[in-house]
Image (tube, rainbow, N blue to C red):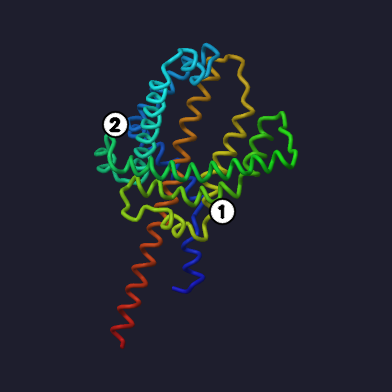
Amino acid sequence: MTESQSNNNRKLPVQRILILSFQLMKQRMYSFIRLGFPIIILALASILINLNDESAIMFLIQMNINPFFMVLILIFLWAIFIMVTVGCHRGFLLNDSGIQQTKTLRWKSREWRFLGWGLLIGLVVGLFLVVWAFVIAALGMERVDNSAITIISNQVISLPILYFFSRWSLIFPSIAVDDPNSNLTEAWWLSEGNGWRLTFLIIIVPLIIEIILSFISIDDLALLSIINTIIWLLVTLYQIGLLSLSYSFLKENHLQEEAEEDNNIESNNYEV
């Protein structure tokens, strides 16, 4: 295989991943509902709270909960989010048997690793975003009173940071399937030459969907809350699918390249 052929084979098939993620969502929707059941319950609770014109966070604050219990609630919510996210990655990457063996409620070493790497990446990205915020303030850029324009401008300004995040994020599906080589170096190596394709798939595509949905205007607040929640759940699941399938393609491609290199070495040794 020539170098140009190898580079072409390593390019993420963006269109195929977009389609396959949607197809797997439909085919395995029952499994995703089971794996995501805790989030669905929380989403329904959020809808009920929103019907009273309150956000979930403001609702908790107004209940005057002890700060210690508030921390426990936040930890519980993060644990639910991690379990569901890991489960959905496994739903896209494993076969039917592997998916069935994945329990809805579980907390194993993979969830701990997911939490640890997530905190580390979140801290790094957060620091960069703070720096960017100061830069924007120093430049005197004013916030535009238009939701779509605001979303676009915020994402464009943050694009360099999101590029790094997109490449590092390959570690999450890697952890979900218990890849022993789950680390940032491996994620960066796997995504080499596909950084902007990854950014497009897991950042830009959901962003485009979010912009389109920002134009939806419904007078019935209850109906609007329900629709927004359902759309958020589906878009988030789709985003997880895009990341999972991107990881799967890149991982399989690298394993295939390594196997070919090993065969070439053995062939050369045999000739010698």
- Depth check: 125 or 20 in front? 125
Residue at position x 56%, y 46% in the image: 162
Secondary element at tag 2? loop
Tell me how far mark 2 sits from mark 1, CA to CA: 35 Å
Amino acid type at circle 2 is: Leu
Query: Which residue is rendered at x = 66% and y = 33% of the image?
Result: 148
- Above or below, 263 relative to 68: below
Q: Amino acid at mark 1?
A: Trp
Q: Residue 171: x, y in percent?
A: 41, 49
Q: Looking at the image, which residue is at 43% across and 21% down?
A: 67
Image point 47% across, 68% down: which residue? Answer: 6
Circle 2 crowding by C-alpha within 10 Å: few under 14, some 14–19, many from 20: some
Q: Which residue is mark 1?
A: 196
Q: Are marks 2 and 1 in contact (CB under 8 Å)?
A: no
Q: Position of residue 28 (x, y in %)?
A: 36, 37
Residue 45 as seen in the image, left or right of residue 51: left
Quarter of the figure that contains the N terminus: bottom left
- In percent of width and height, residue 205 lies at 56, 42
**Front one among 117 and 156:** 117
Q: Please give left or right for residue 85 compared with residue 194 in the image.
A: left
Image mark for residue 47: none
Taking 101 as reference, is 45 above or below it?
Answer: above
Residue at label 2? 105
